[in-house]
Amino acid sequence: MEEKKTFDKNSIIGFLLIGAILIWVMYMNPTQEEKPEADQVKEPAKTEAVSEGDSSENVQNTTETSDLQSIENDSVSNILAKREYGAFAYSALLPSAEDNKITTIENDLVELKVSNKGGQIIEAKMKQHDTYKGDPVYLIKDGNANFNIEFETQNGKVLNTKDLFFEPELSTDGDRQTLSMKAKVSDVKFLEFYYGLNPENYMMDFAIRSQGLSDVVRGDIADLTWEVKAFRKAKSISYENRYTEIVYQYEGESDDYTGQGDEAIEEDIEIDWVAFKQHFFTSILLTDKPFQKGKFISRNLVQDEEVDTTYTKNFRAEIPLELKSGEFSESLNWYHGPSDYQILDDYDRNLDEVVPLGWGIFGWINRYIFIPFFGFLSGVLPSYGLAIIVMTIVVRIVLSPVTYKSYLSQAKMKVLKPEINEINEKHKDNQMKKQQETMKLYSKTGVSPLSGCIPALLQIPVFYALFQFFPSAFDLRQKGFLWADDLSSYDVIYEWDTYIPLISWAYGNHISLFPILASVAIFFYMTMTTGQNMQQSSQPGMPNMKIIMYISPLVMLIFFNNYASGLSLYYFISNLITIGIMLVIKHVIIDEDKILAKIEEKKKKPKKKSKFGKKFQEIMEQAQEQQKNKKK
């Protein structure tokens, strides 16, 4: 019983002691509201002591804490980098791993800026050329282009080079600049984009190669994708867009193009180069070892000229690259420059096919006649406008014998017109007899209704070749003549801002003078020849010359309003010269009375028929006999 009381007493004493201790602790430690004031008093002293080196233990503790935090941060960065970049996390942790860090490689012609992010060209500037607004010409700028290679690593992760960081190394060898961009797995393992630019050259060496990636990259194929949205550079975006398309060469000599609409072409054949061609500038990717196949996609971005004013087309090329044991080894070239026939032809890689000079004989005439001749004239004459005029005069003089033959045939048909009318009236109810008698008259007089058409057909290759030549002549770009400030674009004598749907779609928002002059000249030319050709037009299958007389000037007036003023200048001068030549032929060279006398002479002479003529006459007589028997 005594023990129990003693325990209770001790317990009470213990509780009292614990309570006293708690009270003392609370008294010695202030509340949370009071603590900030103590910290404000003590903290400066602590900081001062550390800065003065009075407390080496505190400094050591702070340093150790900082190192630990740095290690922890590095560990987190490593984890995040490996998660995003896989084996190439090493490159992402280098000091060069910056999105906005760029390296410039340039010469006197072109300036190229390459980004550390993706190792690709993010800006390609033409140093010696401006847009119609006077701004520098950029083929690549503000994210309009993308170059990417997609591949798979051994752990199944899919990587894209556009997301990787590349370490740049720029060097100079004389006037040649080289830039090595390396996405690194380690110091000795990397994927490299190599750029090499020589002076006075738009063509750049470009290589995709790797070292030590055989244990990193899986598979034997990587997918290369190259995409560009082509900037507008000319006054008429629709006219410029007409000459903007993808052109590519395959199997060493053949070439093809995507056309003007939305088009996707997949070729399972060897591809030598692919060009993202704009009207007067182009970007071309070439390979020394042909790509095994490729897919080329072109999408038209101009649906409404009032809204779509920045880009013409979106180009995309998808090309598989062959790998050898996980290693890249592609020797390429990259061209960023003018679509100038002379410049492209000098590379001797069939790049002149990028310039649309026409197929077959039309292209041959341009390559070997008009381009050299115009180059000579523009070199000796003070302006390109005068060069066009002189070249047009020379072409018309050279073709004047053909014009003479055509006009002579028309004059003969005019002389025979009374006799033909008489035959038509006499046999108006017998079509077979009428044709037979008409053919006899032609045979006796030595006149052929086709003799006037054949000379005209001989001129078509020349006219079409020139139609292709002037819009493609880079030398005419931004060269002025008279009121036209740019012979490669339309001239303007009046323009308006209001958009008129039907008129603006077909005619534009301006009036060009050269097409008007060309239309007037064509009208007078057609007026002069309509009377001569009327007899021919009355024959079955021949065109109605009265309709052509009015349609031709109208077509010139409307559709050529947005065309290059150099082309309209050519048509104007050409028709003026043709009118002059025809007046000389009519009033000086050809005498219709003499033609009639010669025809009468031929009528009197017995004409020996050829085997074909005899056979044709027999057929006609048999057909006529059959027709008589049917009537009976």
Image (cartoon, grey):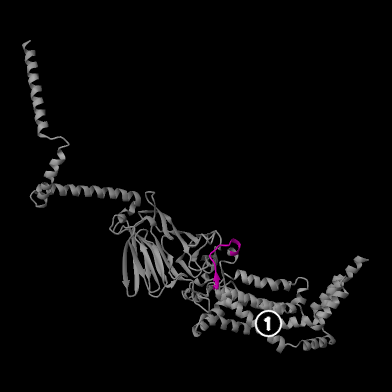
Q: Is residue 202 left or right of residue 628?
A: left
Which quarter of the rendered picture does the C terminus lie within? bottom right
Q: Is residue 524 left or right of residue 328?
A: right
Q: Position of residue 328 (x, y in %)?
A: 39, 60
From the viewer's perspective, is residue 244 above or below residue 38?
below
Few, some or many C-alpha atoms within 10 Å of disc 1 (few <14, some 14-19, many ≥20)? many
Question: Where are the magenta residues, as a range?
Answer: 491-503
Residue at the spot 29% in from the left edge and 50% down from the top edge = 78
* Residue 616 visible in the current orientation: yes
Q: Secondary structure at mark 1?
A: helix
Q: Position of residue 502 (x, y in %)?
A: 61, 62
Query: Front-most of 523 and 422?
Result: 523
The residue that mark 1 highlights is: 403
* Residue 450 visible in the current orientation: no
Q: Per the image, is 497 magenta?
A: yes
Q: Position of residue 395 (x, y in %)?
A: 60, 82
Tally of numbered discs = 1
- Residue 423: name its quadrant: bottom right
Q: Main secondary structure of the magenta part?
A: loop
Q: Per the image, is 200 magenta?
A: no
- Residue 386: name its quadrant: bottom right
Residue at the spot 82% in from the left edge and 88% down from the top edge = 601
Query: Front-most of 499 and 77?
Result: 499
Which quarter of the rendered picture does the N terminus lie within? top left
From the viewer's perspective, is residue 154 above or below residue 620?
above
Amino acid tagged 1: Thr
In the rendered image, the residue lying farthest to the top is 1
